[in-house]
Image: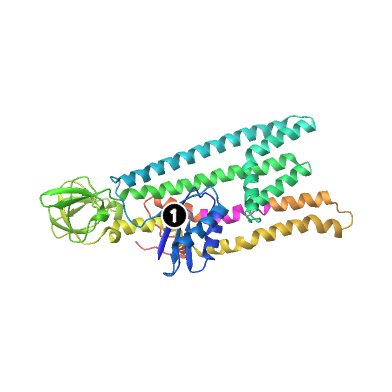
Amino acid sequence: MLKKLVLKGLDCANCASKIEQEVNELPGVNANMNFLNQTLTLETKSDVNILELSARIEGIVRKIEPNVKITYEENVYKAKTNEKSNDADNDEVSDDNNDDENRKKDIIKLVVGSVLFAVGLIFKLPNWFEFTIFLISYIIVGGKVILSAIQRIARGDVFNEHFLMSVATIGAFCIGEYPEGVAVMLFYLLGEMFEDMAVDHSRKSISALMDIRPDYANLEIGDELKKISPDEVSIGDIIVVKPGEKVPLDGKVIDGASMVDTAALTGESIPRRLKPGSDALSGFINKNGVLTIKVTKEFGESTVSKVLDLVQNAGNKKAPTEKFITKFARYYTPVVVFGALALAVIPPLAIPGATFSDWIYRGLVFLVVSCPCALILSVPLGFIGGIGGASKRGILVKGGNYLEALDDVGTVVF
């Protein structure tokens, strides 16, 4: 059984990896997280209790990312003329507005925090005033990270990147290195903003390809035409495609002749002529004549549906490098934490003349430098950026595994 969950608001690649990992540990479940589309695809055995499984998965998601909105995607197509689809479009616009609002808030935090940080660095201030300036700046830019670390620890997730950041920066304040504590949070916030922008850019590039999705089909019933959703059309039905409309389903032309734009499917810029007996594929755009088509495939099996499925699920096909990094990250963070602890405690006890203040500082530096964010994010984001960048140019890459396979290509023959 296949089921798809949409995790709206999931903007942390590391958290997405953890959700996928924990869901895969449930009995009878094979889960695949698509961070780009914010979807979790589940393949379950037929004897699994879906209601119980759904409750457990929602519990996992809430534990790791409490602010994510969970919905279930039905495997049906709804036309934009349909009321439910309009609601979905409105939700999408609302989510885009929320993303813009959050980005504006982050920019304001970054600007205000940076100004206070600069004031603390440039001007010679009394120690208590300098501490206050840096503390306010720290809370503005890093408050969200601290809060997230506390919430995750309360849910039993101790070893995470927010915990590392919190320990390192609070430690910096404890030993009097206020500017360094604030600087780490500033760079982290800036990095997260760039990450969100990169993912958003790739999502929009891929979404632009969704324009090939047909909005409706003109079903011929007697002497009348009825505008309906393409997934309501059956094999053998007769549909009419007027000039300027998209061919909604695959079929054979039985009447009429016209030039069609096939670029969305083939990349070919020269229009193709269709006449009675020609194959008409969904996604073609009718240019000048009226075509009467006998449907040969249901919408779910049509060309445009398969193309859309490939694009939307490109992130499900993970490259070997991506899979390795995901597994490696599970063990990496705990090792870093205990390594930093050993670095702070053992040398002062074992080396004559070594002081705790020096080695605690080095332990904190080690924590910041070893933060897993860059390691865990860089590889999936590299593939997301690659697939998104190719999509912007009309090139469909079916997944990260295919993108990585291109690295071994020595010769391309056209």
Q: Please, what secondary structure does the residue beneath circle 1 have?
A: helix
**The magenta stretch spans residue 373:** yes
Q: Nearer the viewer, residue 10 or 266?
A: 10
Taking 404 as reference, is 132 above or below it?
above
Q: Amino acid at mark 1?
A: Ile
Look at mark 1 in the image and give the residue it sits on: 387
On screen, residue 86 versus residue 186, left or right, reads left
Q: Which quarter of the figure has residue 122?
A: top right
Q: Nearer the viewer, residue 346 or 198?
A: 346
The x, y position of residue 330, in whole percent, is 61, 61
User: Looking at the image, which is closer to me, 1 or 239?
Assistant: 1
Q: Residue 175: x and y, percent? A: 79, 44
Find the magenta span and give its range: 369-381
SS majority, magenta = helix
On-image quarter of the C terminus: bottom left
Looking at the picture, the colour scheme in use is: rainbow
Residue 96: image x %, image y %?
44, 41
